[in-house]
Amino acid sequence: RIARRDTSAKLVDMEYVQVHPTGLVDPSDPKSSSKMLAPEAMRGCGGVLFNYLGKRFCDELGTRDYVTACIEKFCRKESNGESMKEQSIAYLTMNEESAELFGSAALDFYEKKGMINRCNGLSELSSFIGCDENVLMETLEEVNSAAKGEINDPCGRTVFRAPNFDPNQMYLVALITPCIHYTMGGIAINASAEVLLEPSRSESHGNASHPIVLGLYAAGECTGGVHGANRLAGNSLLECAVFGRIAGSRSADITSSIAPALDPKIYLPLRLRCRRTLSARGHIHEFTFDLPSSKHKLAPFFKPGQYISIRHTHHNAEPLPEPLDRYYSPVSRDGARGEITLLIKAEPERGPVQGHLCSMTPGDSLLLRGPCGGLSFDLFDPKVERVGLICGGSGVSPMVQIIRECLFANVHKSIRLVWGVEYSEDLVYRKIMDEQARKHSATLNLTYVVNKPDFGWVGEIGMIDEDMLRRYMFRPGKGTKIVVCGPWKMCQIMKELLKNMGYTEDMVYSFM
């Protein structure tokens, strides 16, 4: 909450709190708000739980939530002295065999802390618990019978690693009560351990993904959203090791001199932050890569509409005979800090390049360089008053960036987009584009063309043709620029159609 107060950090999953059933009660300070945990191995090695009546009330090897609920239901005693009033106390009891399985060194630690008491025989044990000795004797006989398989355990326990509860042996007893063990909620982070901002401040940062608190990283239990509603045992260490290492590395990189994020001639490795599959058929993906640090951005070395090159050197972990280079346009703004996002059509069976992309997981690296070329005109030139965008399929990539750049900079230009796809589901940015068109109705106009539409489609059907361009594109003239991107054949057809409509070469830029 301090992070939210001081930096407007986003918090998530604050309602999810994990309770541990066996928090050790310190007899010298029973009301202490801090508890030391009794390891679950105490129960796993054969320990049993008694309530203040000397009776068992649950399967000690059940889940944490289950055992906690049973303690709260069957162990609340309000007449056991003022110091323990309002607490649900159970007695975690180990016989000599279970104590040996647990280990004397570990037990010595808890005994020295005053958390474990030794009771010599049944009489001392019942006196310590404060229960009837005969009732406790019946409970121990029941445990012995269940352990031998003579009866089914009334509490449902099926594993008894230390089955001999002889009334004359030494018992080790700890007072336990449920306590908070782990909070799943906390500060929201992304895959690069960067702290996310509350959505209300997103407009001031304009990242392609989610806005971040620049230069602030988090890892460990202060973070949320990593474990879902209930953390699996042991995963907190994994979380600290994975995100702690990432946070340390990324924060250290901030102190280095800020050189350009990419080099136009030399391929540099960038780490894959995350990959999102956008289409139902699983063939269109967003790949987000970390720039060298969260302070790096493509601008001013990149201009809107410029593209990058990716070099592939391996396929199925085997080196390729020769590197394969492919070119892509970012969909993220050049001013987005710490990341670059690419829209890529990739299917695993479509050759080594697409296969390699589909096999990548967060943390993998890919070689990138840029800028490698792009728009032949300055998008922010005040003489450019109207920008027409014509694209097919994933050729929408540079158009997304152009639209984002213009809307973010609040430049006074009219933008018209005609986007043709094969299937309706290929309009992967339609929802966000429609939202922006509603917000900027005087600036942004969108037309979708689907060759094989779903039932009920009310937009244009077929392929982009001259008639559609005449209806939806700007007329040729001074101050008008047209950008074309898509498959090679489509680009050639569009350039011919635009020429027939009166557009001159200086008015049209085609990526293919």
Image (spheres, rainbow, N blue to C red):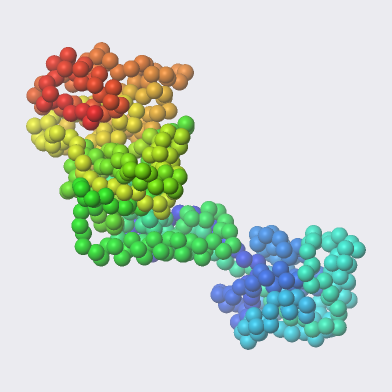
Q: Quadrant of residue 158?
A: bottom right
Q: Quadrant of residue 428?
A: top left
Q: Position of residue 458 (x, y in %)?
A: 39, 18
Image quadrant occupied by the C terminus: top left
Q: Is residue 512 left or right of residue 366?
A: left
Q: Observer-nearest residue: 144 or 287?
A: 287
Residue sitting at x 13%, y 29% = 385
- Give the residue at the far front of this rendering: 321
Please tell me whether residue 462 is drawn above or below residue 72 in the rendered image: above
Q: How many marks?
A: 0
Q: Is residue 218 left or right of residue 412?
A: right
Please tell me whether residue 343 is drawn above or below residue 424 in the rendered image: below
Please tell me whether residue 99 is drawn above or below residue 463 in the rendered image: below
Q: Observer-nearest residue: 502 or 352?
A: 352
Residue sitting at x 35%, y 63% = 249
| Residue 104 seen in the figure | yes
Residue sitting at x 67%, y 73% = 176
Q: Position of residue 171 (x, y in %)?
A: 77, 81
Q: Observer-nearest residue: 140 or 355?
A: 355
Residue sitting at x 35%, y 49% = 366
Q: Observer-nearest residue: 127 or 219?
A: 219
Q: Is residue 216 left or right of residue 143?
A: left
Please tell me whether residue 212 is drawn above or below residue 331 in the rendered image: below
Q: Position of residue 162 (x, y in %)?
A: 79, 72
Image quadrant occupied by the N terminus: bottom left
